[in-house]
Amino acid sequence: MLSVEDCDDLTVGQVHDLYRRFVNRSQVNLMTSFGFGRELVERAEGAYLHLRDGRRILDFTGGVGVLNHGHNHPRILDVRQRFAERRRMEVHKTYFSPYVAALGHNLAELLPGDLNMSFLPNSGAEAVEGAVKLAYKYHGGRRHTVLHADISFHGKLLGSGTLTGASRGHFAFPGISGAVPFTYGDLDSVRAAVAAHKGDVYAILIEPFSASTVNWCSEEFLRGLRELCTAEDIVLIFDEIYTGWGKTGSLFYFMRYPGLVPDVVTTSKSFGGGKSSISAYVARQPVFRKAYDNATDALLHSTSTTYYGFGEECATAIEAVNIAVEDDYPGRARRIEEQLAPGLKRIAKEHPDEVARVAGAGALWGVSIGGGPRVLDLAAKIAPGGLARDPRFRAKLVTAAVVNALYQDHDIYSYYALNGDNPLIVGPPLIVEPDEVDRFLDALDAVLGQGITKLLTRFAAQKLSSLW
């Protein structure tokens, strides 16, 4: 048996071997072919990864939404250490947790209207499924249709995967029944779907800001959706798994519009401060109480029959939320936008052949990369495996070449989204400093200045060399 201490001494080759034998062989092949996973991280702090070989990597991924607080925020580490030192109880089925109670209170204090009733699962996908299940129970099982956007990402469980729009993957898993798509941001499309299933729609699920495609709903659309759901007694669910806690310049994206209140909102990712795997769905009191507020149904929903809301996880989330409020994370995101917005638009203007689109809000932006030689079209047709069937193969390859150059030449870690037009995501942690934002912008400018053909040639050569 390997110990925790043994992990510190494993080489990258040994880690790859263990992954291939006991975790996921294809994951190793995929990540290393993109230039990642060939080094091990010694430690992580703030906006930086410190590799064992001495390299210091500026992490501009923001942990794909998890790291608004950066890596290993000192206040969050202190809370977790105190919890352990005092031997606090993590969980017990029949003892109430002060940490669950306090976290529920804080969420109710911060969210608008009567969004007061919280449930605390482990992951974003579980929060989405819990919210949809709540909506179904609210209607007593008498309605059978749930509407979701055609561009969306809600998770990879069977239910949340059903409700995810484009890019569900090439394998068709079974899903929940009654899931019907509508056109994102198009109120007439929603109205038509409701009319087609008159009296049978129990929930509408929407991301006010689609982080995986870098699109967002207009105020007119969101308010129209609220009016429609109120008129038809449909439970309106806002998925803010990625965009919560200040990322786009307001505490939650929908809160930039005063008086707009969904029936349920979901959150996860940075909710746990980068250290805790925790999520929440928070419901309006009338919805929650009609569904579960009776002795028969009080325990009808849980993530397991044994537990939810681990003490240390909730204590971590309490501190993470308090930091986001006290340090004004929405304001930090707006200040980051003041640099990113003009900087990215300038880069797009200077590299029109390489940049097709720039869009975003706060500290979450997408840069859609285009260009490249026509031979890419042929490469896409003869690509091995399922790649030839991927209509976005060209866009992914071009963007991967840019990601690779940022990492190899400038020690900047970035990624591209797997949805929409696969934009390069610019989503730094909210603790990033102005000089670090400038460093990223300068690096992206320099990389694009090489031209897509050169970037692709180099990327392909590195990929081929990794196979030998």
Image (spheres, grey):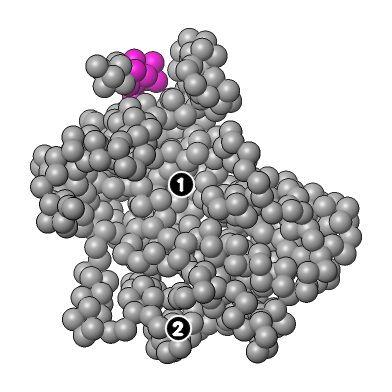
Q: Type of residue at label 1?
A: Trp
Instruction: Identify which residue is drawn at 45% across, 51% down.
Output: 364
How far across and how far down the image is residue 415, in percent?
39, 40
Q: Type of residue at label 2?
A: Lys
Instruction: Identify which residue is drawn at 34% across, 18% down.
Output: 460
Q: Which residue is mark 1?
A: 365
Task: Provide the residue span drawn in magenta.
Answer: 449-460
How far across and how far down the image is residue 458, in percent?
30, 18
Q: Which residue is mark 2?
A: 93
Instruction: Identify which residue is drawn at 28% across, 47% down.
Output: 59
How far across and how far down the image is residue 214, in percent?
53, 46
Instruction: Identify which residue is drawn at 47% across, 29% down.
Output: 396
Q: Is residue 49 visible?
A: yes
- Report the side of 75 relative to 303 (left or right): left
Q: Is 403 in the magenta?
A: no
- Report the side of 77 relative to 307 (left or right): left
Q: Which-is-in-front pick, marks 1 and 2?
A: 2
